[in-house]
Image (cartoon, rainbow, N blue to C red):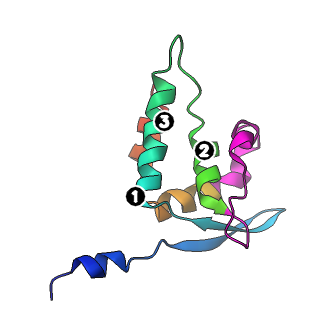
Amino acid sequence: MAVTFDGLLGLKVEQELVEVAGLGKVCVRGMTGGQRDEFEVESQRRKTAKPWPLPVLFRARLLQACCHDEAGKPLIPKDKVEAVSYLPAAPLEPLVEAAMRLSGMGPKDEEEAEKN
């Protein structure tokens, strides 16, 4: 049977709890199509900013978009994204991997976002 528009509207954004060493479990939710579009547009804007490019902050912005508390609110405030970029990468990597997978991103998306 062919998929209908109503069937598409029934798709749900996936989420999962990811264990972070020394912290506990973090809820990671995939992005919607619109959220991913905004994420990619912001990455491009940062790369082409004038008079000089801004840091893309791929991982920090990805975690801000995808990590939520128990109530569903973003765990990382937008004005704290740069601070997240200074955290150790290794413990955050499971969160980044889950956020990318749940948002339909692959390694090429990360490479493209970070190219200057």
Quarter where residue 21 is shown:
bottom right
Mark-to-mark CA distance, 3 and 1:
15 Å
Residue named by callout 3: 43
Amino acid found under the numbered disc labelled 2: Arg
The residue located at (50%, 20%) in the rendering is 49
Amino acid found under the numbered disc labelled 3: Ser
**Residue 79 is one of the magenta-drawn residues:** yes
The residue located at (76%, 38%) in the rendering is 83
Q: Position of residue 76 (x, y in %)?
A: 72, 52
In the rendered image of this protein, does residue 9 appear above or below residue 89? below
Which residue is more in the foreground, 61 or 91? 61
Mark closer to the chain start, 3 or 1: 1
Q: Position of residue 75 (x, y in %)?
A: 72, 58
Residue named by callout 2: 61
Nearer the viewer's eye, disc 2 or disc 1? Answer: 1
Mark 1 Cα-neighbour bin, 10 Å: few <14, some 14–19, many ≥20: few
Q: Which residues are magenta?
A: 68-93
Residue named by callout 1: 33
Amino acid found under the numbered disc labelled 1: Gly
In the rendered image of this protein, does residue 98 appear above or below residue 91? below
Q: Quadrant of the N terminus?
A: bottom left
Is 112 on the left or on the right of 94, as rendered? left
Mark-to-mark CA distance, 2 and 1:
16 Å
Which residue is more in the foreground, 72 or 30? 72
Q: Is residue 105 visible?
A: no
The residue located at (70%, 49%) in the rendering is 90
Mark 2 Cα-neighbour bin, 10 Å: few <14, some 14–19, many ≥20: many
Mark 3 Cα-neighbour bin, 10 Å: few <14, some 14–19, many ≥20: many
Looking at this rendering, what residue extends furthest in the left direction? 1
